[in-house]
Image (cartoon, rainbow, N blue to C red):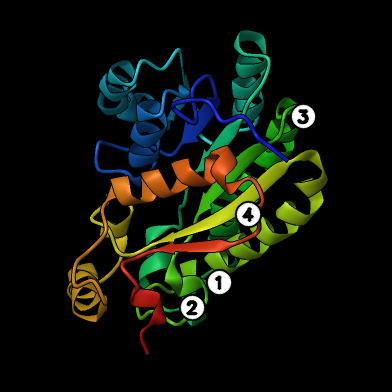
Amino acid sequence: MTVEIPRPPLKGKKALVTGIANEHSIAHGCAKAFRELEAELAITYLNEKSKQYIEPLAKTLEAPIFMPLDVSQPGQLETLFEAITQQWGRLDILVHSIAFAPKDDLQGGLLDCSAAGFAKAMDISCHSFIRMAKLAAPLMTEGGAMFAMSYHGATEVVPNYNVMGPVKAALESSCRYLAYELGRQGIRVHAISPGPLKTRAASGLKDFDLLLNEAVQRAPIGELVDIMDVGFTCAYLATPYARRLTGSTVYVDGGVNIMA
């Protein structure tokens, strides 16, 4: 079977990227990679405070859709997808790069995590992806690709990752189940597991600098990855070149995950 692949391979594709906090965000790397391959972008910002940092990035990336999205606020996700439906009528790529846990619950051990904190971390960091996928799937009429950002702490104990370990484990499992449920529609789903990156989200982890230094020492390639490494991995997986790949947890970490 011959598949006609456009040049560039994402030309004309419509991509929704959520979770950009600033220019150093993993989601920003994804958006830049998609745009470089000529996809059209929809970009979200969390609130008015964050808008001032993200709006210049959205303009540089020529995103025709730029809207607020706080997945903890009822109705915002639906409003976003209504706008995408009205303006584009379809969607090809979805990036979920959203994670949150209350500071006290994140910085304490798992035994000390409150029920409310655990539930909030699970809702924002995991279940919001499921809700997003449910709204995106009907728009992926010609198939598509969905990505959720995980971390190695989902499968191995990473000191100080605490409640986010179980939450990311649930996210990775959700990706596999969604890949199964959506596969017949030509929709592929992957969890992406980047190595440690200097992002705003990571700054909330205790002793994160030690984690970065350890990653450099353990990585077979001897260096950290950056947001564009993650972005171009997602871009490749979104192209027809990867049309029969789905349900994977893809590590973009310089090989750290293979080391004992």
Residues at marks 1 and 4 touching, judged by CB atoms closer than 8 Å: no
- Mark 3 or mark 4: which is in front? 4
Q: Image point 32% across, 51% down: which residue?
A: 229
Residue reaching furthest top? 87
Q: Quadrant of residue 37?
A: top left
- Mark 1 or mark 4: which is in front? 4
Which numbered circle lies on residue 245?
4
Residues at marks 2 and 1 touching, judged by CB atoms closer than 8 Å: yes
Dot 1 falls on a residue whose secondary structure is helix
Q: CA distance from mark 2 to mark 4?
A: 34 Å
Q: Which residue is mark 3?
A: 138
- Mark 2 or mark 4: which is in front? 4
Q: CA distance from mark 2 to mark 1?
A: 9 Å
Dot 2 falls on a residue whose secondary structure is helix
- Mark 2 or mark 1: which is in front? 1
Tell me the amino acid under the disc marked 2: Leu
Q: Which residue is mark 2?
A: 110
Dot 3: within a 10 Å radius of its alpha carbon, few (fewer than 14), some, or many (20 or more) residues? some
Q: CA distance from mark 3 to mark 4?
A: 20 Å
Residues at marks 1 and 3 touching, judged by CB atoms closer than 8 Å: no
Tell me the amino acid under the disc marked 3: Pro
Dot 3 falls on a residue whose secondary structure is helix
Dot 4: within a 10 Å radius of its alpha carbon, few (fewer than 14), some, or many (20 or more) residues? some
Tell me the amino acid under the disc marked 1: Pro
